Structures are given as C-alpha cells and as structure tokens.
Amino acid sequence: MAEFVSLAQGIEAVLSDGCSVAMEGFTHLIPHAAGHEAIRQARKRLTLIRMTPDLVYDQMIGMGCAERLVFSWGGNPGVGSLHRFRDAVENGWPHKLEIEEHSHAAMANAYEAGAANLPFAVFRGYKGVDLPKVNPKIKSVTCPYTGEVLATVPAIRPDAAIIHALKADREGNVLLEGIVGVQKEAVLAAKRSLVTVEEIVEDFGPRNANAVILPAWTVTAIAHVPGGAYPSYAQGYYKRANDFYIAWDKIARERETFLAWIKANVLEKGPDAFAQHARPSRQAA
Amino acid sequence: MTATPTEMMTIAAARLLTNEDVCFVGIGAPSAACNLARLTHAPKITLIYESGTLSTRPTVLPLSIGDGELCDTALTTVSVPEMFRYWLQGGRITIGFLGGAQIDRFANLNTTVVGPYDAPKVRLPGGGGAPEIAIHCGQIFITMAMGSRAFVETLPFITSFGHGTGKGDRAKLGLKTRGPTKIITDLCVMEPDPETSELTVVSLHPGVTREQVQAGCGWPLRFAAELAETPAASAQELAVLRDLHIRTKQAHGVAA
C-alpha cells in the first residue's frame, strides 16, 4: 500500500546503488525533481532505463550516477544533442557508460511484457537494420502458427520505477491523463515504485472512466512535489518549458558550465525549488 | 516573395500530402510540411505523433513530439505501447515522414553513429520510432537538406531500412510496404528508379542546377531523362508557412 513520504525518503526507499530504475514519462510528466534528488543522494552504478533519456538522464549521467543506459532515442527533442550523454559515450566522462540500445517499438513492447509478467516481448520490427548486430539481446522467434520470424526483446523488469503524476488521493491512488506514455507499464513491471505528484486531493471526484489510475496497492511510495516535472510539463498545470530545453543545450555543452549549473540548481537546492514552476490549472494557458 | 531552400523543401513536401493521408509525423521539417499541408490544401489530413496523439491539429509547431499542444488539439491520445502496436504495426498509417543525419543511394538512413558503434566519433540520438516506421507505413517520405556529409556513398550504420542494396531487398525481408518513395531536399526531389530503386533526381527546385545538386551528394547522382522543375512556392504557401513559423517562435522562442 502506498505510503506518503518526502521526496528524499522516497528516493531512499526505492533507489539503491547498483539497482535498475525506469524513470518514465514520454515528454510529458518526466520526473525531474526525483532525478535531482537521486543526484543529491549521490546514487551510483545505476542501470538507467528510459525510452528517451532526455534532460533527466543527461543530468544523472553527467553526475556519474549511471553505469548502464537502456534507451531508444538519446537526443534533446527539437534542439539537438544530449551533451552529457554524448560525452559519456564518446569520451567516457565522468566514466565509461555501457549502453543497451533499442527502438521505441521494442522498448514500448518490453515494458508491456514486463507489466504482463511475460519473459519477453514479440513484435514485427528491426528488419534490415544494424541494431541487432550490436545489441545481442535482440533475438527472434518463429511464429508457431504462421512460420513468420518475429523480433523479440527481453521484458523490462526494473528494480524500481519512478514517475510523476497529476494527482494522488488520500488513499494513495494515483491519476495521470494526457500523454500517458509507458508509465503505467513501467510501474506495473517494476518491483517497487515512487510516484511524485502535482497535487494530493481528498477524492478524485468526477473523472473520465478511462483515465489512467494506478491503485494504491500497486505503488510503493508517493511524494508531493508540485512542479516536479519541470522543465517537462503537467497537463492542465503548467506547460513544457521549451525555452529551458533550448537553454540546456548551452548549459550542458561544456563540463564546467554543467557542473556549475548542477551545483547551483540541484546540490544547493531541494525539492521546494520546483514549486515555483507549478501553477494552479486555471492559470495555465 | 521567394522561398529559401529550406522553405522550398517544406513546401515541396507539403504538396505531396492529401486529405486521405494518415501521416506519422516526426519533429522538424516533417512536422512543418504536414501542418502546412493541413493549413492549405489538405485540411482533413490525419496527423499522428508517436507520443500517442491521434488526429492532432496544432496551431503552433511542437518543439517535441509530445508537447501539450498536440494532446490539447488531438481527437484522442493513446498510450505509447498502443501507438506502436495497434496503430503503427497494425498498418493504419499511410505515410511515414522521416529525416536523418545520413542517407545512402538506396534511401537507407543513419541516425545512430558516425564512426564505429563501440567508439563513435559522433554519437547521434539513435533510431527512436524510425526503424519500425520505415517498415510499417504504406510509404515513406524523407526530408533532408543536401550536403556531401549527409548524402554519403556508404553508411556507417543502418538505423532504418530503405531499399537495402537495391530493388527486391524489401520483398526478401517479407516487407509488403513500399518504403521510401520520395526524398524531398532543399535543392530537388528524388525518387527511387523503378528498375533499380537507386535514388534519381526527378525535379529541380527553381533556379537550382544539376551541378549544385551533385555537389551536395557523395555519390554520382542519376538524373531522370525528363527532369522537371519544381513549381515555385506560391504567395499563399509562403505566407502560411512563415505565419506558422512566427507563431511557433512566439510560442517557444525558436523556429521548429
């Protein structure tokens, strides 16, 4: 049953050195505040799993939290490179980063297989391309009914899943809407989970019957962190800070500017720093 | 008004789209082209972004494939596994729009690495949705600006499959989709040759010479026997495109 905790307690509870973690959110609801807390707690040797590493993993990789990265698209959306990710892969800074690379379809299927308690995912993909030559986990299976050869990848079963959601109610149920990505699958595939939320409400009240709801008994811990997705966004609360995604290109390009930014904005700050980015939904344009 | 080469690329790509198309849209030039088509001659075109937004009608171009604008203006939004399983793999998409860092003469694309995979000179973002977009959509349009580092003789890595080493390679893999049928660049439009699938220049944009196009390509290019000239951008096309870029710039401080 979900426990209400502070962000620091939540990270301590679900994330230990050397574990695998999926911090998901497809452009929307990326758990940036949780990433900052992992950096503050100096987590090491993590296997970081995410379809799009985005700024959250660029920051954690640059701070040496990651030993391994499982991903399918490692860019700054609409802007260009993730410079800390590139520096790790190209130059081994701050240390060597092992990578396991997939396509989006493969990772989405692998999360679903994890949630469904299956050992692997099967799909039609990876035809004619080089990724299977460099990723030995990509294999194939022959359909017993048609004889068609299909691609397979192992299910994703992370030690921990960390997501940001819109609301939790007092019982610890979690609600997300909008672009819901693979968060439900990531939480259900993981051994334990931390959810940061914009808002804690008495009761969800009238809602769409098909909203994504994670019942309290599927979640380990919930931390109230308003603005915790910034510079990603929370539908109905605040918009994606596209200007920050653009600014990140310059901040992260050099090691010195990156480290100075982390010191001022992560190491010397706490989760409260995110609150300034949260606005009541009625004011969100 | 005269179109810049990049505007001409976007406009030439937009003209290929129709009201009947269901398009899987990538960020950048593809997104601009698809929305230009929607705002001009193809108001009923269905645009799908891989974040799960179906039939979206953004008023500004998104910076990412998952901007809130896409969800706010979508008919509905599905999860990412559903997007890739039911809609893309399910064969519901008629046109996939791709770009890339590098392309070869059979329209295979590289967006993964320059140099060896294990010790890359440049680590690019990787495939994302592209490897499966390339095989599941009815046909593929590619938009890329020309340059001899982008249009290369040999790719260091094949991220998404075009026509392999020539005609028949797609069929050998069991693929029933057409693969890349149009490559829209800032200088010209290319199509795979019906006999060999090698890219052939079929139309030059206004004022562009064969020499200019060849200079932007790392292999000796083939030109169609009857080489057309791309019709110049109309005042309406340019006005709508520039207006879209101005709105986009105001919305997030950059032209997407």
Image (spheres, coloured by chain):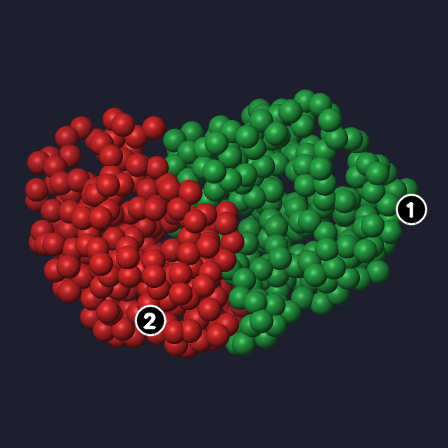
Chain colours: A red, B green
Q: Bin the neighbour count of mark 2 within 10 Å (Cα to Cα): few under 14, some 14-19, many 20 and up.
A: many
Provide the chain ID for the residue under circle 2: A
Q: CA distance from mark 1 to mark 2?
A: 57 Å
Residue B25 image offset from top left, x and y in percent: 54, 42
Q: Secondary structure at mark 2?
A: loop
In the image, A156 versus A228, the foreground residue is A228
Q: Which mark is residue B225?
A: 1
Q: Amino acid at mark 2?
A: Gly
Q: Are marks 1 and 2 on the same chain?
A: no
In the image, B59 versus B90, the foreground residue is B59
Residue A206 image offset from top left, x and y in percent: 18, 28
Q: Secondary structure at mark 1?
A: strand
Residue B14 image offset from top left, x and y in percent: 65, 34
Q: Residue at x 53, y 66 (%)?
A: B123
Q: Decide if residue A196 is on the left or right side of residue B8.
A: left
In the image, A61 versus A182, the foreground residue is A61
* Screen quadrant of the C terminus of chain A: top left
Q: Bin the neighbour count of mark 1 within 10 Å (Cα to Cα): few under 14, some 14-19, many 20 and up.
A: few
Q: Quadrant of the rendered structure where residue A108 is?
A: bottom left
* Screen quadrant of the N terminus of chain A: bottom left
Of tags 1 and 2, the one toward the viewer is 2
A42 versus A104 height, above or below: below
Q: Residue at x 45, y 63 (%)?
A: A254
Q: Which mark is residue A64?
A: 2
Q: Which mark is residue A20?
A: none
